[in-house]
Image: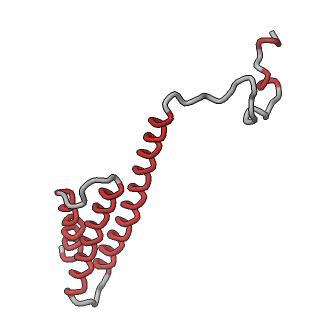
Amino acid sequence: MAGSVPARRTEKGRGHLLDLDAPRRIVADPEKDARDLARVQRWVMSTLAVTTILHLVVGLVVAAVMLDDAPTSSKIGLNVIAGIFGAFAVAVGRAIHGKRIVSPWLLLAVVPTAVGLWLTFG
């Protein structure tokens, strides 16, 4: 029975080291593997960029809502700036994926401005 246990299991705590009896798997198609990795990297990068910019958008809307003694034009201005940054977030996400920047998706920039104005004056 002791002969059926793999050599790397006999020494407890050393399973993470190189095992010469079980060599590393060779990738059959390295180009496909590189393409898959690049696609995942693009998605991670675009997700990080868009969510970071959207945090700025939410901060601008919250600032517009929290201004008490400010003129109405300041509140509207902050909401419009939030919409501009919302358009920038969409454009950055599309640019990272290599898509056309000018597209109907840019209409999503109206959403932060509309929500911000509704929260500010509603």
Q: Is residue 117 above or below residue 9?
A: below
- Relative to 13, 41 lies left or right: left
Where is residue 26, by image quadrant? Answer: top right
Q: Quadrant of the N terminus?
A: top right
Residue at image point 44% right, 45% down: 40
Coordinates of residue 55 in the picture (x, y in percent): 38, 67
Where is residue 80, by image quadrant? Answer: bottom left
Q: In this view, does 6 lie above or below 57?
A: above
Which is nearer the eye, 42 or 107?
Answer: 42
- Relative to 30, 43 lies left or right: left
Coordinates of residue 113 in the picture (x, y in percent): 21, 70
Coordinates of residue 41 in the picture (x, y in percent): 45, 49
Where is residue 62, by image quadrant? Answer: bottom left
Q: In which quarter of the image is the C terminus?
A: bottom left
Residue at image point 74% right, 23% down: 21
Number of marks in the rendered image: 0
Residue at image point 18% right, 68% down: 114
Coordinates of residue 28 in the picture (x, y in percent): 52, 27
Which is nearer the eye, 34 or 106?
Answer: 34
Q: Is residue 24 above or below residue 42?
A: above
Residue at image point 30% right, 84% down: 67
